[in-house]
Image: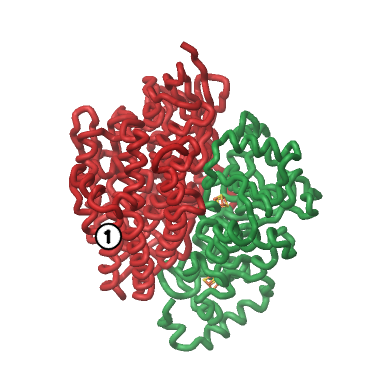
Amino acid sequence: MSSRVVRIELNRVEGDLDFELTLQDRVVVDARCIGSLYRGFEQIMIGRKPMDALVITPRICGICGTAQLNAAVLALEQLANLQVPATALHIRNLCLMAETVQSDLRQSFLFFTADFCHSKYAGRPWYETAVSAFLPFKGWAHKGALEYSRQMVEIVALFGGQWPHSSYMLPGGVTSPASPRHVLNSLSILNKAIQWFETRIIATELDQWLAIQTNSEFFNWLDGKPGHSDSAIGLFTRIGRDIGLQRLGFGTPHMLSYGAYDHPEQGDKPSALRDRRYRAGFLNGDSGQILPFDQTKVSEHVRFSWFQPYSGGRHPFQGQTIPDYQPHTDRYTWCKAPRYQDNVVQTGPLADALIDGDPLITSFYQSEKGSAWLRQFARLRRTAKLLADMREILGELGKRSGSPHIIPPHSSEFPDGEGYGLVTAARGGLGHWLQVTDGLISRYQVVTPTAWNASPKDSEGRHGHWESSLLGLEIDNPDDPVEVGHIIRSHDPCLVCTVHMLDSDTRISIRP
Amino acid sequence: MKSLLWLQTGSCGGDTMSVLCADSPSLEELIDHFGIRILWQPSLSTESAASLERTIDAILADQLALDIFCVEGSIICGPNGSGMFDPYRGRAKMDWIRRLAEKAGVLVAIGTCAAFGGVHSAPPNPTDCLGLQFDKTTGGGLLADSWRSRLGLPVVNLAGCPTHPNTMTKTLAMLATGIPLELDHLNRPKLFFNTTVHQGCTRNEYHEYDVEDTSFGGNACMFFNLGCQGPMTMAVCNSELWNGRNSKTRAGVPCFGCTSPDFPLDRDLFLTEKIGPIPVNLPLGVERANYMAYKSLAHDAAPERVLNKKMDT
Ligand code: SF4
Ligand code: SF4
């Protein structure tokens, strides 16, 4: 047996992501997922005014700034016990969905399917078709995704001024009303996107496609017409399954979802108690049971991270993040290891769909488990759902012209105390936990979706989700490991997301 | 054909996401019609990471010409000046940038981070980061003040957090086609940094007549109370709309001055600092002594429709 360690850096991911894989005869026997960039984001928050979180935290991530903004605003609203009018929640939901659709289209057709054009596959019968669809800047699916992802975020710009990086969700609501001009402009953008999605991506009308409930119905649909198998999703399915992605990259069976999109009529309740359009929960992969989600069960370990060690895990309200860069030890990353009730979990569209009970995804999961292919498929299934949801919300917003979009708080000062905001970003569960002391932020902990997935080993030595999704994989060419790319990209990695908030020292603030 | 290499340092990827939103010209057009050949872009390249290594080595060995070198993100110097909070191939990324810069026809700082340090350099600047040729408002970035690229230009600072999409693609198109680029005192291309955000804001009439909002969500101007820095900030946001649609100030979000070297300011970002009733920072070039008198006159002259904030945004 020959053993070697290879270091793999991934492109087409946001941020710096390396893997160190130990191979024995080309089979992965150990994996270390390395987030190599440290930005110290959370430390910047300490000592600032609470509202500043709405400007600083969206800059954690260029892809999911709207979700970061939403998490921050929910945490502030919980802290100050603020209500939100229904129109504002509709607008927030609409913009979150637009951002997710943008991200899912880019992830699928700019980042993921590009690998099908790899020269490794040049001999396969589908290769020419793959190239004509997925080749960067030339293939029709790549071009369409560029065009429509760009248009999708125009909807965010209509309500929020710009995308990326705006701060239009404020405590108590949003900054602009449901003007019929914005609503109609958004509808017009959405209609065109749906038309493209229906003709090129699923070759079927949205509602019919969403009505497919089981994997056998899906395969019948796929073989039903040549148009179906030549659609982007048809190609993705045929190619992905031909190269065996349905048998790869399972990772941990435990899944977590915070649920998504607050019920608009429940803006008078604290956000943690609102029903959501998509349900929250924890799927125990051993028992198959879906249990209610409870944020007190979240903890973070640092045993294998470059932070000053503490034993076991800590809840974000007790979190400690003091950088301690020790490159030549057994610690290997800037990611912490979040755990839920001491379980390694995965988060993202597959977890969301299973916990919400999507029948088609559940049917595949029951027969094949959560593979790299299913994870990516769940993402595209979600796009179809969100496009339909957005149509519904815009219909509702059209009727709400003139209704209040913000309830300005009585005071611009925030009380001392703590709050958290949990949302579903494109990559899964995102949480902000903040504490305010003497009117200033005294602690700010962010646990990003990628932190869950890219987690290193914890204090019990259990591998994180991506790491475990690679164990046992056989790699053809360790110098150009296409398989690793497929598996890791199916999780939509975003390493800029693994931010670190420090609460070790107080920031000195200069005030007039 | 002009070759383009795009690397990310300490960034959020927001400028890459922003450039994908460009529509006039779009990124695709740069490739199809403006003769730009992308050697590498971290989010878009399909080549293996090993091929990036070969590309970089070839540039450093003068076997491959590097015409346009784009750097997105803050230059991270921590811990203790080692740069190892942000390594590439076992070596600080700031060292790679320094060496590649020597080969570049032109070096473009993509975003306020690369230009001036940006959000990551906000106090206490936990990773000791800088811009390429500036450290916030002063020189003293990664490269010396006197540094010039192969074509004789200082670092071209495409400021913004993120940079406006069309500011990026238009500048790159100018560089690719040889249209001369005039820079301002902060080395930003004048063409895109010669108007204030305030010019073109739909709330301007409220500003003129001193009709000011005191809480968010309204129609009026946000200068006196809500922290808007539009009158002091140079950017195209209101003359070339974002995503072809809108701007922050039009949507009721104050301008935070993200194209300025001191972004983000180290104070309450949603409040206007004042001395007595007058903001500390006045619109560019305005005389403090006259400002109060002018404002109260203007308020008295305000038409009813403006006072009642009945205009639409
Ligand atoms: S300048 Fe702004 S958008 Fe660009 S990388 Fe920095 S924080 Fe992100
Ligand atoms: S809101 Fe800002 S940019 Fe708009 S008019 Fe007022 S000061 Fe100017």
Query: Is B224 on the left-hand or right-hand side of B35?
Result: left
Q: Is residue A435 visible?
A: yes
- Mark 1: which amino acid? Ala
**Quadrant in which the C terminus of chain A is drawn:** bottom right
Mark 1, ligand 1, within 8 Å: the answer is no
Q: Secondary structure at mark 1?
A: helix
The chain carrying label 1 is: A
Q: In this view of the protein, which residue sits in the foreground, A512 or A329?
A: A329
Q: Please provide percent x and percent y for residue A288.
A: 19, 32
Chain B image colour: green
**Residue drawn 57% across and 54% down?**
B264
Report crowding for label 1: few under 14, some 14 to 19, many 20 or more residues within 10 A (C-alpha).
some
Query: In the figure, residue B293 lies in which quadrant?
Result: bottom right
Q: In this view of the protein, which residue sits in the foreground, A274 or A144?
A: A144
In terms of image quarters, where does ligand 2 lie?
bottom right
**Residue drawn 46% across and 47% down?**
A131
Q: Please provide percent x and percent y for residue B82.
A: 66, 32
Q: In this view of the protein, which residue sits in the foreground, A219 or B294?
A: A219
Query: Is B142 on the left-hand or right-hand side of A279?
Result: right
Can you say whether A8 is above or below B291 in the image? Answer: above
- Numbered-mark total: 1
Residue carrying label 1:
A388
Q: Please provide percent x and percent y for residue B58.
A: 70, 37
**Residue drawn 20% across and 37% down?**
A290
Query: In the figure, residue B207 lies in which quadrant?
Result: bottom right
Chain A image colour: red
Q: In this view of the protein, which residue sits in the foreground, A67 or B156?
A: B156
Q: Please provide percent x and percent y for residue A195.
A: 33, 64
